[in-house]
């Protein structure tokens, strides 16, 4: 049975490879912590908040993220696709997630606000009702994704093929239309 921690604030910590393994954190706050060396095994975060933390390169296989908020975090090259899918809910604000993977995840209703999402793998991901608010989606891949009712209105640099991606009732700004027409080699001026 995992070790359980409730309503604790952790600040200015750098975690080692196995330090967090087999632990469950509920209603905890992590401030200015570095998780980049971690190779998480059987770790659960419930109703937790991460502020100004670094996860870049961390191995988060089989981690449970249940209503978790990331604020101003660096989360480059992290594979969320191997997270525990039961009650998976995450939200990102002012984060850098470049080169991370959400492949095949169901992240319905997730919010990305003011995030750098460069070269993200959203292939075959359920993005239904996801909010991309003021996000850079340069070179992110959406093939076979379901982005119905997703909101891209204030985001930019995306290229989405409507033939390969379900985008029924998704919201786009007029300025972003070129990102939907790229494969047709059409110029929009």
Image (cartoon, grey):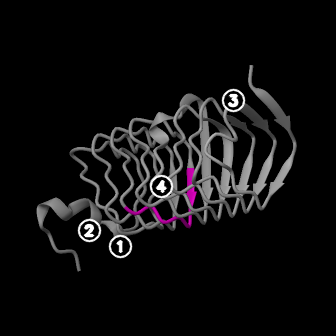
Q: What stretch is highlighted in magenta?
A: 111-118
Say which of marks 4 and 3 sits in front: 3
Name the residue beneath numbered marker 2. 178
Circle 4 packing at 10 Å, graded few (<14), some (14-19), many (20+), is many
Circle 2 packing at 10 Å, graded few (<14), some (14-19), many (20+), is some
How much space separates mark 2 and mark 3, taking CA atoms? 47 Å
Q: Which mark is residue 22?
A: 3
Q: Residue at x 40, y 39 (%)?
A: 125
Q: Residue at x 74, y 19 (%)?
A: 1
Q: In the rendering, at what x and y percent does residue 76 appear?
A: 48, 58
How much space separates mark 1 and mark 2, taking CA atoms? 7 Å
Q: In the rendering, at what x and y percent does residue 5 appear?
A: 83, 36
30 with respect to 54 (left or right):
right
**170 relative to 180, above or below:** above
Circle 3 packing at 10 Å, graded few (<14), some (14-19), many (20+), is some
Asked where in the image residue 67 lies, by quadrant, the reply is top right
Say which of marks 2 and 3 sits in front: 3
Check disc 4 and report its element: helix, strand or loop. loop
Q: In the rendering, at what x and y percent does residue 139 appear?
A: 31, 62
**135 relative to 141, above or below:** below
Depth check: give the residue in front, 143 or 179.
Answer: 143
Check disc 1 and report its element: helix, strand or loop. helix
Q: Which residue is drawn at 59% across and 38% down?
A: 40
Which residue extends farthest bottom?
189
Name the residue beneath numbered marker 4. 151
Of label 2 and label 3, which has the lower sequence position? 3
- Per the image, is 31 magenta? no
Name the residue beneath numbered marker 1. 175
Circle 1 packing at 10 Å, graded few (<14), some (14-19), many (20+), is few
Q: In the rendering, at what x and y percent does residue 61 appear?
A: 52, 35
């Amino acid at each position: 049975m995992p070790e359980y921690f409730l309503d604790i604030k952790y600040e200015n910590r750098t975690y080692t490879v196995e330090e967090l393994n087999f632990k469950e954190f509920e209603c905890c706050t992590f401030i200015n912590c570095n998780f980049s060396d971690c190779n998480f095994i059987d770790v659960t975060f419930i109703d937790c908040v991460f502020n100004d933390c670094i996860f870049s390169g961390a191995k988060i296989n089989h981690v449970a993220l249940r209503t978790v908020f990331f604020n101003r975090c660096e989360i480059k090259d992290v594979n969320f696709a191997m997270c525990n899918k039961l009650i998976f809910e995450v939200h990102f604000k002012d984060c850098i997630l470049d080169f991370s993977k959400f492949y095949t995840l169901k992240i319905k209703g997730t919010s990305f606000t003011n995030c750098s999402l460069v070269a993200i793998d959203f292939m075959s991901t359920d993005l239904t009702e996801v909010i991309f608010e003021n996000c850079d989606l340069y070179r992110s891949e959406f093939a076979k994704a379901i982005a119905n009712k997703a909101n891209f209105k204030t985001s930019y640099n995306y290229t989405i093929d409507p033939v390969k991606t379900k985008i029924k009732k998704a919201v786009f700004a007029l300025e972003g239309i070129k990102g939907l027409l790229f494969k047709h080699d059409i110029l929009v001026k």
